[in-house]
């Protein structure tokens, strides 16, 4: 779903968000007006507003989460259609995939993130908006530390009995102790062998003890956030230490054979700070991480002032040329591990980015981009221009 759009929230009739840590929270949330209306629209072949991100990607020729999920769970299609009522009501036992955003405990403060996902960004958001850090509009974003609540733990234990896939994102899931406890629940239930596990991680940590738990699962996959190599990555994903990240990525790659059905991917959030440097990321993954699949290139839509559409006309021409050259190079000298469909997917993603960049101009957001960049540079003692001098026409 378009979770990045604050308007697209599963709310009750009073406008309050449904929370999974409330007693019986899953039962009401799963069959709320919001969820039933999404199901009705999908059954009618429509495009629900909450699903726009996936449809937008599909329109650009980029493989979406919706499409990959439909493929992975196609064997349940007939049963799901049979058990979903005309008003969109569906039994909880149909939950096969559990996507747990473990809150906002994170050790990074990525430039495109917000306190919703990393509470470490609170002070910088407060000073940017010139409000105190306890301003309710900001503290509301932080939310409750819900994952340790007993109602949620009970809900998890019940739902995971039917699950086939378990996804953890954060914050940073490998830093959250409750994630490990949940893995132990699944192992103790004897269910791990029927479950695919997937992480979205910044890979700043890679705890050795987790490898023993991961060995129980049917498959273990990682989507590793990687927005730039070396100093570009450090600038976007402050206070990332590239050396440390590189070491963890190479360790994960080297241990792929010890992880059941390991699926390893890097995910690049394509934004104004890195669109001119995607070739370095693709080259790094191809050469340093041979067990990783082709990198996933995900367009940033929010915050809009970091979108590639904010580039000046001249920089759009430059970005387009670099991306075309990258696609051509991948086709001519494709790394052996990406031959075939992965290479086609990667080239389709690059073409989708080119189309997106040039379809609309958001130069109106340039002042916001400048203010945000200067604010972070100042508070962090960094210089975007020293690392990305080609952005001088925007920031100079
Ligand atoms: S690693 Fe993820 S959650 Fe943490 S700051 Fe970066 S984008 Fe946000």
Image (cartoon, rainbow, N blue to C red):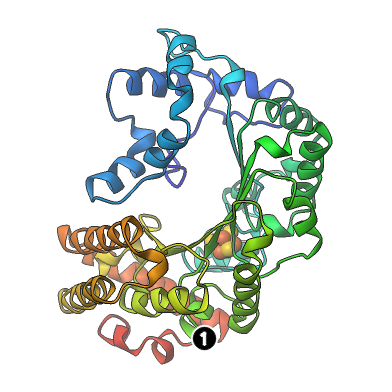
At x 36%, y 70%, the residue is: 369
Beta carbon at label 1 within 8 Å of ligand 1: no
Is residue 105 at all visible to an observer of this figure?
Answer: no
At x 38%, y 74%, the residue is: 274
Question: The residue tagged with tag 1: helix, strand or loop?
Answer: loop
| Residue annotated with mark 1 | 382
At x 39%, y 88%, the residue is: 385
Relative side of 41 to 195, left or right: left
Q: Position of residue 249 (x, y in %)?
A: 60, 72
Q: Position of residue 115 (x, y in %)?
A: 58, 57
Is 241 above or below relative to 225?
below
Q: Position of residue 165 (x, y in %)?
A: 60, 38
Query: The N terminus is located in which quarter?
Result: top left
Q: Position of residue 378 (x, y in %)?
A: 52, 83
Between 102 and 279, the one nearer to me in the picture:
279
- The number of numbered discs placed on residues in the rendered structure image is 1
Between 24 and 256, the one nearer to me in the picture:
256
Q: Quadrant for residue 91, please give it.
A: top right
Is 269 above or below relative to 284?
above
Query: The C terminus is located in which quarter?
Result: bottom left
For label 1, the crowd category at 10 Å Cα-Cα, with few meaning under 14, some 14 to 19 and many 20 or more, is some
Relative side of 107 to 6, left or right: right
At x 45%, y 47%, the residue is: 4
Location of ligand 1 given as a quarter of the image: bottom right
Is residue 339 at all visible to an observer of this figure?
Answer: yes
Between 43 and 287, the one nearer to me in the picture:
287
């Amino acid at each position: 779903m378009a979770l990045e759009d604050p308007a697209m929230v599963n709310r009750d009739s009073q406008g309050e968000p449904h929370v999974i840590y409330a007693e019986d929270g899953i039962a009401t949330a799963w069959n709320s007006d919001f969820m039933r209306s999404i199901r009705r629209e999908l059954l009618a072949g429509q495009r629900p507003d909450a699903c726009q991100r996936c449809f937008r990607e599909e329109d650009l020729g980029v493989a979406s989460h919706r499409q990959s999920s439909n493929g992975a769970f196609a064997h349940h299609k007939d049963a799901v259609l049979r058990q979903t009522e005309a008003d969109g009501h569906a039994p909880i036992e149909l939950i096969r995939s559990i996507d747990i955003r473990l809150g906002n405990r994170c050790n990074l403060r990525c430039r495109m993130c917000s306190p919703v996902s990393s509470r470490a960004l609170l002070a910088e958001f407060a000073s940017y908006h010139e409000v105190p850090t306890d301003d309710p509009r900001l503290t509301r974003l932080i939310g409750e530390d819900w994952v340790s609540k007993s109602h949620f733990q009970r809900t998890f234990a019940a739902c995971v009995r039917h699950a086939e896939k378990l996804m953890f994102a954060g914050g940073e899931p490998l830093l959250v102790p409750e994630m490990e406890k949940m893995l132990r629940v699944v192992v103790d239930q004897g269910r791990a062998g029927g479950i695919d596990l997937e992480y979205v991680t910044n890979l700043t940590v890679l705890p050795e003890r987790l490898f023993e738990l991961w060995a129980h699962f049917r498959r273990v996959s990682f989507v590793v956030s990687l927005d730039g190599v070396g100093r570009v990555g450090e600038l976007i994903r402050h206070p990332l230490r590239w050396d440390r990240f590189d070491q963890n990525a190479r360790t994960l790659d080297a241990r792929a054979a010890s992880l059941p059905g390991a699926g390893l991917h890097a995910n690049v959030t394509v934004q104004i700070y890195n669109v001119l440097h995607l070739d370095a990321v693709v080259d790094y993954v191809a050469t340093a991480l041979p067990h990783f699949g082709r990198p996933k290139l995900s367009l940033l839509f929010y915050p809009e002032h970091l979108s590639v559409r904010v580039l000046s006309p001249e920089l759009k021409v430059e970005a387009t040329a670099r991306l075309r050259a990258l696609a051509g190079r991948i086709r001519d000298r494709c790394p052996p591990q990406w031959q075939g469909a992965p290479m086609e997917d990667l080239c389709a993603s690059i073409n989708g980015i080119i189309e997106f960049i040039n379809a609309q101009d958001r130069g109106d957001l340039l002042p916001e981009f400048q203010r945000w960049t200067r604010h972070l540079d100042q508070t962090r003692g960094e210089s975007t221009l020293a690392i990305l001098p080609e952005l001088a026409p925007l920031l100079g």
